[in-house]
Amino acid sequence: MWRIVLTIVKRDLALYRRRPMDCLLPALFFIIILSLFSFAAELSSQALRDLFPTLLWIGISLSMLLSIEGLFRTDFEEGSLEQWVVMGLPLSLFVLGKLIAHWLASSLAWILISPILGLMLDYDLGKFGQFINILVLGTFSLNLVMAIGGALTLSLKRGGALLGVLVLPLVLPVILLGTSAVFALSAGISTLPYLALLAALSVITVSLAPFAIAAALKVSLEA
Amino acid sequence: MLEANQLTYRRGEQLILKNVRLSLAPSTLLHITGPNGAGKTTLLKLLVGILSWQEGAFLWENRIHSPHHPDYLSQVLYLGHHNGLKLTLSPLENLKWLLEFQNEFDKPRVLSLLTEMDLSEVRHSPLENLSKGQQSRVALIRLKAQKRRLWILDEPFTYLDNMAKYKLQTWCVEHLLGGGSILLASHTPLLLDKANIHQNIHQQTLCLETPCGE
Amino acid sequence: MKLFSRFLGTRTFYQLLGQCMPWTMLGAVIFLSIGVVKGVFLVPPDYLQGEGFRILYVHVPAAIFSLAVYTVMFFCSCLYLVWKLKIADMIALASSAIGASFALIALITGAIWGKPMWGTYWVWDARVVSEVILLFFYLGYLGLRGAIPNPLVAARASAILAIVGMVDVPIVHFSVEWWTTLHQGSSLNVLRPKIAPVMLYPLLSMLTGFGLFYLAVLCIRVRTEILKRERHTRWVKMHQF
């Protein structure tokens, strides 16, 4: 069973290595959002620092929306999805593998981008390690939950706006926890409770989401 | 070996297949013909579990009643219109990632099959740099690399040059002689008219949407 | 389940619903009128909130039923996905717009109530946020249905969404217990209601009225859906309703 997950993870990581821009683009998009916001809002740097946690998570969600849309699309169009169904093995395992690979690749992109972010906002880089923890843990659930929306809209040619509506209710818990965690981090309070809650959320989503995603993918194949 | 009856499939409001029946014994080639849009691809997809019919009965080896059952699917190899290959990966990598799932990747064998299909020099180039014909040949290698009893092929001859067509026909004959069966949807008939070895192989034709041309 | 759907053909359903509809609509009108008259005119003003509290007679039933209707959609979606009962899918589809309206009414009346009470139209407390999320699930359901061209695929995809969204319903309900919010705790309890009887009865009347209204509109919408889907069959073509 784990061989399937592992094979997909390795395959997708190989794919990402061939096209590194696929992973970096969302992170770059996030920097653009952030820059636009700071220029347009003319906020003092203190205000920006206060808003940073919220901006961070909203920006991550928006840029992840872009990459999730394409996540299953190439497999759908090239016929890989069909082949997985024909193999007779549980589709949820393939889904899990794809999402783990996507999460690993995008986490790497975020980790690379974060110092730039920190510099842009004079953010205290001393707590860098914890910041990365929050980010990595939060994006895990975010990936899984957004993929549900992505799978449901797979058969649509331009599902973009609908994807946003579908995904918004599902990501709210993660965003709430994530922003609280980063707020706590900058206030110097222990982030442990938030990390624990994020971890719990990750466990719940990883045990439920793949089945919903697999069902939605099978439905999309019929279209 | 395989029987399907009363298959009816609608996509939305449109009736695509109505009361189709087919049966397949070992060492049989069933050739599915019909004009474009007759539902050949749909029929094949129904038989591999990608689509689900509204009405129909299915029987595999007298014990399995659904095309979604893993025991049935583990014996099927499906090559559809989209071959499931990733264009950014090379032939060798593509085959590796397709065969690894069920632990069927035997590197020396795959390499020799690549040579047999005349793809040895390009085995490390990304598929997007290869021609459509070469890409199709990579997909065909799975037929020999994976041991399956039932081959379900949807228009496999598209993009193939004469050499590759001949290779495919040879492989099909070998498969049939070995007891396997083939469901083939194609405009081009599979030329099995070489006399002596073919007494052990049966051929049938299923025509969708009468009247059919000869 | 197969026997059920085979013996109860859609024509029978159509006629059955047709008979239910007038009664439920009548009942709805009666109960809603009683509730409105008593609640608006006859109940004395609240000692804390003055006259403004009366809007709860619309706000509370709308909110409760936005949850109840979603639960109905959840069960129907399960029935549809597992046993392929078409009537379940029709009920879910018909309920979705009604439930979405209820959720919207709940949010709007809540905002109207909030202004004189707490000085602001909108507060992001847990119950409001989770109710907004529920509204989005409703809208997502309708959007998915409308966007996917193949009706069967659309039905199954939105059924999956309805099932996923069910996690929000307990969150809305228990949000007052789990977080400190603007909303008070639950006042309606079958055994020991914490609300004065004279205020309770109009509320119960409104609740019943809302419920019957939902059923009446459901009957109408499901009948329309049946006609739409079965428009090629003899009994519809011959107008043998």
Image: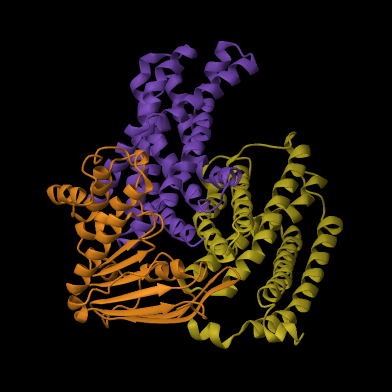
Instruction: Confirm whether residue A176 shows in the render.
Output: no
Instruction: Give the residue at the far left of this rendering.
Output: B108
Identify the residue at horizontal 71%, vertical 73% (top origin).
C219
Instruction: Tell me, by letter, which chain the rendering colours purple.
Output: A
Q: Position of residue A116 (x, y in %)?
A: 43, 16
> How is the structure coloured here?
by chain
Using residue B175 as the reference point, say whether residue C45 is left or right of it. Answer: right
Q: Position of residue A72 (x, y in %)?
A: 43, 47
Q: Position of residue C224 (x, y in %)?
A: 72, 72
Identify the residue at horizontal 38%, vertical 60% (top origin).
B80
Residue A36 vertical position relative to residue A1 in the rendered view, above or below: above
Instruction: Give the residue at the far right of this rendering.
Output: C41
Using residue B28 as the reference point, say whether residue C29 is left or right of it. Answer: right
| On-image quarter of the C terminus of chain C | bottom right
Residue A148 vertical position relative to residue B211 in the rendered view, above or below: above
Total number of numbered discs in the rendering: 0
Choose between A72 and C93: the one closer to the eye.
A72
Instruction: Tell me, by letter, which chain the rendering colours orange.
Output: B
Q: Colour of chain C?
A: yellow
Q: Position of residue B181 (x, y in %)?
A: 26, 73
Identify the residue at horizontal 76%, vertical 60% (top origin).
C198
Instruction: Confirm whether residue C90 shows in the render.
Output: yes
Q: Quadrant of residue A12?
A: top left
